[in-house]
Image (tube, helix red, strand yellow):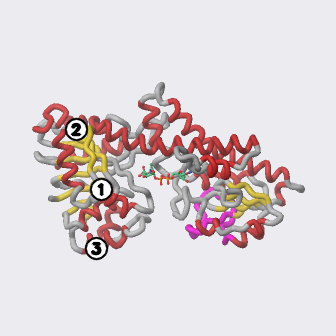
Amino acid sequence: TTVSVIGLGYIGLPTSAIFAKQGVKVIGVDVNQKTVATINKGEIHIVEPGLGDVVASAVKTGLLRAVTTPEPADAFIMAVPTPFNADKSGDLSYIQAAAKNLAPVLKRGNLIILESTSPVGTTEQLEAWLQAERPDLTFPSSHGDEADVQLAYCPERVLPGKVMEELVMNDRVIGGLSPRASKQAADLYRIFLKGDCLRTNARTAEMAKLTENSFRDVNIAFANELSLICDKLDINVWELIRLANHHPRVNILQPGPGVGGHCIAVDPWFIVSSAPEQARLIRTAREVNDYKPQWVLEQVKAKVAALPGPAENKVIACLGLAFKANIDDLRESPALAIAQCIASEHSGRTLVVEPNIKSLPSGFNGAQLMELNTALEQADVILLLVDHAPFKAITRAQLEGKVWVDTKGLIDG
Ligand code: SAJ
């Protein structure tokens, strides 16, 4: 069997490497020439623990090879980005472009699996694009199990930072456009999968992925809303959640500065744009979480204003930029957005502590990246944005004479 993985990013590259590790011949396809060159050198262009070694040995043994144009294979796995449009609907242009490039090399007996997080109906849309390019082949919507080419949707659900482990261990939902497509896809994943293959249809599988991330978003929104309510009513939200979670059927998540990353803050919108009238709670949860950074900024402004003396003499230290604890990923990070806003709006000095990066990204307007203890000494106002391990060790004694805003409950919790 030869597997071709289209899109060599955070999901496609680990998937390619894991197939190759099992002895499968893998052709990785990416439109980015630089990415392809890097991989063919046995190197990687993304940060993910454990990935580098597996890619290096897969390239060395010749089992993994990267190219910019699709070549014939037995099975194709598509893992290209699905960002959203200005109106929050899913942008399927990467899938459409990949389909157009793939169509010429398709042949009878091929299996195509879509892994990109996608609005409901995308796998059927992909099939329609392929059918238009290849009228000589038959597809499952019209020919079911007898079709020349089979298609399935199978979402990835791995947690960034634990991809190499979760890729093998997590159960997988497999939604074929025909029963045969589901079976073929399950047989393919079983080459490396230790978790179960759960078979369903494509629309249910598409919705399952969106549902999982919306579930988390709604639950985080509940915690974030509680943090606003508790602030107004003068209650410690961290203590409140701890107490409520003693109830055997209550399990509240943690408030924070907002929701970041490229999945949970995006995927719920695919549900909302497909069913705007019905998806009221899911939409509101998104709005609650998106509002949180602004609320944090208002808290900081109020703290600065309450201090004696002009604001330009006050030093604010922002602790953490990443979208969650103990990673270097700043994409869609509410902590990053908050710190950049402070750097541009605050008239005094802004200090930034982010132990996982070596220099500040653009948009920081003169703010200084520095080491934790120096920042704690120099700052008047301390803003805790991420629960990185070193920040958990901060003691109240180190904050003597300072004011702080604690979005993660590191001091107040
Ligand atoms: N967060 C909170 N409070 C919490 C938990 C998380 O504020 O109690 C925040 C985090 O700080 C972060 C954001 O939510 O900003 C998302 O972090 P996360 O750890 O919940 O999730 P991601 O984005 O790293 O990965 C998610 C996972 N989905 C679920 O847990 C349902 C992962 O399994 C998916 O594969 C991934 O999205 C994806 O690619 O869709």
Residue 356 in magenta stretch: yes
**How far from the left and from the top, in percent, is residue 2?**
17, 59
Q: CA distance from mark 3 to mark 1?
A: 24 Å
Tell which tag, 3 or 2, sits nearer the viewer: 2
Q: CA distance from mark 3 to mark 2?
A: 35 Å
Tell which tag, 3 or 1, sits nearer the viewer: 1
The answer to which image quadrant residue 230 occupies is: top right
Q: Residue furthest front?
A: 248
Q: Amino acid at mark 3?
A: Ser
**How far from the left and from the top, in percent, is residue 63?**
21, 68
The residues colored magenta run 352-372
**How far from the left and from the top, in percent, is residue 59?**
26, 70
> Residue 57: which numbered mark, if any?
3
> Residue 177: which numbered mark, if any?
2
Secondary structure beneath dot 2 equals loop
Q: CA distance from mark 2 to mark 1?
A: 22 Å
Q: Amino acid at mark 2?
A: Leu
At label 2, counting other C-alpha atoms closer than 10 Å, the crowd grade (few under 14, some 14-19, many 20 or more) is many
What residue sits right under mark 1 in the picture?
A: 195
Up the image or down, 208 lies above or below 66; here it is: above
